[in-house]
Amino acid sequence: MFLVFKRWKKEVETQTSLKFKCLKSNNGGKYDSSQFNEFCSKNRIRMIKMVLGTPEQNSVAERMNRTLNEIARCMRIQSGLPKVYWADVISTTAYLINSGPSIPLGYQLLEEVWFGNEVNLSHMKVFGCPSYILLDSNSRDKLDLKTKRCYFIGYRSDMYGYKFWDEQNKKILKSKNVTFNENMFYNDKTLEFAM
């Protein structure tokens, strides 16, 4: 946790030119090591630790956890994807929330405030929709299908593109060359073939 925090602190300070001043934790032990305390002291980061077992002291984080779970549950149920993809639906939910307007920022988009750039949201897609990934011409024969049918399960965090579940081969694929059918979901797959 300590190395992740150090990397994140450096990234935030580099992107914003602002100094990290305070760290608030639930006192669960993740931020309670001599190495962590020494780092915070050296960098003049004030550590605020709540009383153990009192989530109400961290109401903002607790409310966001509940919001993430409620939205993710609705998205997963609507799509019909199996529960095994809970981490992907939670990640996608967080991505959508972070990409949307923020009430404390006067309904501005976080990314626009953070980076000062206008944001284009046209890449947003419907979670769980059937998607057709364009296969590389080197990985198929002339008479093979040019696309692979998968289901959209999220956005790539490492670069532009999307994540998909390849139901046939039971694996996760990543691609940006794809066509989405946003009018259907995983649980509509029998209807899709009947059309």
Image (cartoon, rainbow, N blue to C red):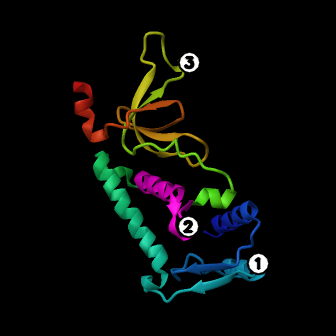
Query: Magenta segment: does it hold 149?
Result: no
Per the model, the C-alpha gap separating discs 1 and 2 is 32 Å
**Horizontal arrangement in the rendering, residue 151 relative to residue 31 (left or right):** left
Q: Residue at x 57, y 49 (%)?
A: 157
Per the model, the C-alpha gap separating discs 3 and 1 is 52 Å
Q: Earlier in the sequence, mark 1 or mark 2?
A: 1
Per the model, the C-alpha gap separating discs 3 and 2 is 49 Å
Q: Residue at x 39, y 69 (%)?
A: 66
Judging by the rendered image, the residue that carries numbered circle 2 is: 106
SS for tag 2? loop
Question: Which label is found at residue 43?
Answer: 1
Query: Magenta segment: does it hold 95?
Result: yes
Picture coordinates of residue 72 (x, y %)?
37, 57
Question: Which is closer to the viewer, label 1 or label 2?
Answer: 2
Q: Amino acid at mark 3?
A: Asn
Asked which quadrant contains residue 15, the reply is bottom right
The quadrant in which the N terminus is found is bottom right
Picture coordinates of residue 23 (x, y %)?
63, 78
Judging by the rendered image, the residue that carries numbered circle 3 is: 138
Q: Is residue 83 at all visible to an observer of this figure?
A: no
Can you say whether 70 is above or below 186 in the image? below
Q: Amino acid at mark 1?
A: Asn
Which residue range is magenta in the image? Answer: 87-108
Please name whichever residue, 147 or 169, is drawn nearer the observer in this view of the structure: 147
